[in-house]
Amino acid sequence: MMSDIKQCRAEARAIRTAIILLALAAFAPAVNADEGQSLALRAAIIHTGDGDVIRDGVILIRDGRIDAVGDISVPEDVETVDLGDAAVTPGLVDANALVEPERLVPQRRAAEIAAEAEAEGRTNFLHTMFADEHEPENCAACMGTSFCALAAGHDELAEGEICPVCGFGEDIWSHFGSGVRSNLVLSETSSEVVPHTHVIDSLNLRSPDFERLLRGGVTTVFASPDNSVVIGPQGLITRTGGPVRDRVLEPADAVTAVISSDSFRGAVRNRPPYRFLVDAQSRRPNTRMGLAWVFRKAFYDTIRYEKNQPVYGADTPPELAFPVLSRILEGDVPLRMHARQQNDIKAAIRLADEFNLSFTLLEATEAYRCIDQLLEARVPVIFGPIYMDPSGPRARTPETRHARLSTLRDLLDAGVETALSAQDLREEDGLARQMMYAVRTGVSPEDAVQAATGTPARLLGIDDRVGVLRDGRHADLVVWSQAPYEAGAVPVVVMLNGRIVIDRRMDS
Amino acid sequence: MIAVLNDLFGCHKECRSVYFPVTQETGCMKVLLAGLAAFLAGSIAVESAAAPPDKLALTGGRIITVTGDDIEEGTVLIKHGRIVEVGADVDLPYDAMEIDTTGMVLMPGMIDPQSPRGLDRPNENVPVVPFLNVYDAIDPSRLFFENSLRDGITSVHVMQGNNTVVSALSRVVRPIGLSVDEMTVEPEVGLKLAVTPRSGADRISQMFELREAFAKLEHELNRLAEEKYEESLEEDENIDVGPGEARQQGRELLRDSDFSDKQRNLVRLLRGDLSAWFYAGRATDVGPAVEFSRHLGILDSSILVLGNEAHRAVTELEDAQRPVVLDPSLYHRSRDPMTGEIEEVFVPRIIHDAGLEFALQPNPSASMAERYLNYQAAICVREGLPREVAFKAITYYPAKMLGLEDDLGAIEPGKRANIVVFSGDPLDFDSWVEQVFIDGVLAYERDRDHRLQKLLRLEREGHEVIDPGPDPDEGDTKTDRESGEQASDAGADA
């Protein structure tokens, strides 16, 4: 039976694409449904994002918002566009996106980058360290701006071995060859505790990375900081497209704490995966116990500060951090904890318990090993990405060694509220493809879609606005050429507030 | 045991998950070794040493033949490791062992068109090494081979990397076997000639070294020819021809045994016995590669291995009409140097529109999907390329490039029985490789792939559950990759 369905699916594919393109052609670019306008979309499959799938349903859009969804009759004055076999989902929501703040450097020669760096007068630590041996042409460590002494020897690295200087393997160029994969927002590193800083200040809302996300069907992201400090800045929740004035949903949202060691060069240090240039020798803390100490001290200092008692010592947070930390203690500012290994996950639960904090767990590579603890502590998880082999920053930490393909399935089966995130990955590994991986590894299609739409929106507290196709929500939706978790699916049309922002009908 | 055999051989009943039992009669050493090798390499293959029956029939599945039409509910009859008959109505010999593949999809084993990943090091630090052979550096125990098998790749063209000028002699191997000899499908395929500068070199010195290699050869061959001509003369005979004529006559007298190791493979390359795999990493390298190939007179036996940006030289490629191996990243994204805008190009579309045959490569640096050749083909179909072309680009076209189109790349009578059994359409990403047959031997079964089972945390009947699941109090089970550094981490777990 199953194979029959698949067979039919394969046969119908070519015809289906043609039909969709025809159907969509009727839905001219001028037809939008923002301010004062209405539009009805009829589609074969509508994933509402909260686990429901409506077959042959209609989405009625008025004034940029969803008016009604389901088997409804369309008022006579509203134009109906039949999307045929296409599938419609809410715009995908990535609750832990690492967005490239400024620019992307796809396909650029290291020499060009080096010249640019030189022109801008940028230098760094490794530059001076390995000045004599440097071959900027070959260096992926610094992309030509600095000096990886061993870059010339990268071809000599064995399979799976990483360069002790730059942390890349034999195929260094693949990381930079066609689109940068390591897109991270910088954290402020002047202190280990910087919850008073805001990612929005370092983020260019016109960064081309948003366009990449949007083309991949991701319409809303929580832009996370990178993992370089223990208690990091406040991220923001933003749309990835549309007029900039409408984009930002929450300018300052949750604070991310990092309870994992992004071990680099074999050292246990709470250092960022690739910001090795900042502070190769000087960062504190250097161990997991030091990390826990910094976290504890920040909150104990806050309690002292609230009581007007003196705070002092090496890792004392900056004074401006205390009001934000107080609000975290009161539960006004959400807390997220980034942890990969099971011991770190358990440490996060313990630390949160100490201050009676509730939090959301990020990445959680080994979450399958502590499902009971997660259930008991009622910790929701923003899991992901799913991978066969870690790439980018994850390739450089030993914390991904016990990754399992089935973790999302296991978490969902156990009843842990879990959202899926692609973090820094885009295109073939992006959030839409993460749904495909989830389906491959045993998650039901409905759950996979929900984990990339409704669940992350709920965890971000924005499901009253986006992430589900229900009455009153913004009409942020994606029309896919076929079911979105299939290999052949392409986001053909992306709508924000009922307005078309990506239109690939003309591409084919 | 014999009774079991008779049972299996005699009746055509469903025996999907059957693996071949050991027999006394056919306890062929080679196969035992193959089984053992795969076992050592990661215990993913058949547990019992597989003694293949002489005749094997895969029945009931949908067959993607690649070169012909798809066959619904077809049968592939295999005899002594070769396909003898394919079709919807095949009369099964009474002694054929039948494997029911109903509901499955069969396609030819996929081909990795060129990869240095089976080698201990991708490149030699001497730039011109046509006298070397990858035979000496292939490590059968590499995880790469195990993964290739798992992903449905049945032939790997092991060739040195791009950081060279003239590479070692390449060969085609199967991802099973304990020794290189056992793995070998075709021992002598070609040499890689890199036009794109290797690390530390610039274009001028790269081209100089490339030209120099052949200029030296020419010089030495002339000297050899002169000697040969002189040898051919009677003792009292005078040299009565000019040097040019003498060389020409001498050349005709040269035999393979006259060449030194350093010359032999280059001579065979120039004769067209070996194929030339020109690496052009950038568009600017395509013109010189084609030109140099023409200059050597080996354009007809040349293949172009392209970098991600090289499609921009599509005019030159079209002009050369030679098959190309595409970069694993199928989209080329570039930033306009003036406006800063990012442009995206789908490379196979351009190559296909230029009328060229191309081979796709798996992307080893991708985190998941692009690591699979069948997904690379699915991307092509998604972008509007014909399904048939997408399948050929992972099977038949690379087979042609390797000169092995009579052996590999399609499900056709006469070809090697390299067949991948998918649980569904290979272009759907929720399809898994269920079984892989290489030369008629069941080389892989997903049900017995312990590593994959562990990653998927699946429990199968009759198999020990390897992953203990959540086990908070035990320390991590150490694998060999992990060192003492992890041990200190475990201490943090209270």
Image: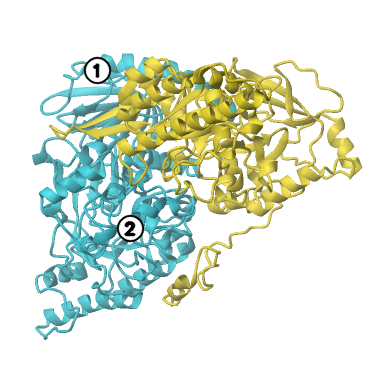
Q: Is residue B411 above or below residue A467?
A: above
According to the picture, the residue beneath numbered tag 2 turns out to be: A166
Q: Where residue A372 sits: x, y (%)?
A: 47, 65
Left-right relation of B185 to A261: right
Q: Quadrant of residue B354?
A: top left
Shown colour of chain A: cyan
Of residues A366 and A306, which is closer to you in this image?
A366
Residue drawn at x 52%, y 68% is B476
Q: Amino acid at mark 1?
A: Phe
Of residues A503 and B354, which is closer to you in this image?
B354
Q: Quadrant of the C terminus of chain A?
A: top left
Subunit of label 1 = A
Of residues A154 and B35, which is closer to you in this image?
A154
Left-right relation of B96 to B355: right
Of residues B399 and B127, which is closer to you in this image?
B127
Q: Secondary structure at mark 1?
A: loop
Q: Quadrant of residue A26?
A: top left
Q: Quadrant of the N terminus of chain A?
A: top right
Q: Secondary structure at mark 2?
A: loop
- Chain represented in yellow: B
Confirm whether circles 2 and 1 share one chain. yes
- The mark found on residue A27 in the picture is 1
Q: Where residue A169 sits: x, y (%)?
A: 40, 53
Subunit of label 2 = A
Q: Amino acid at mark 2?
A: Cys
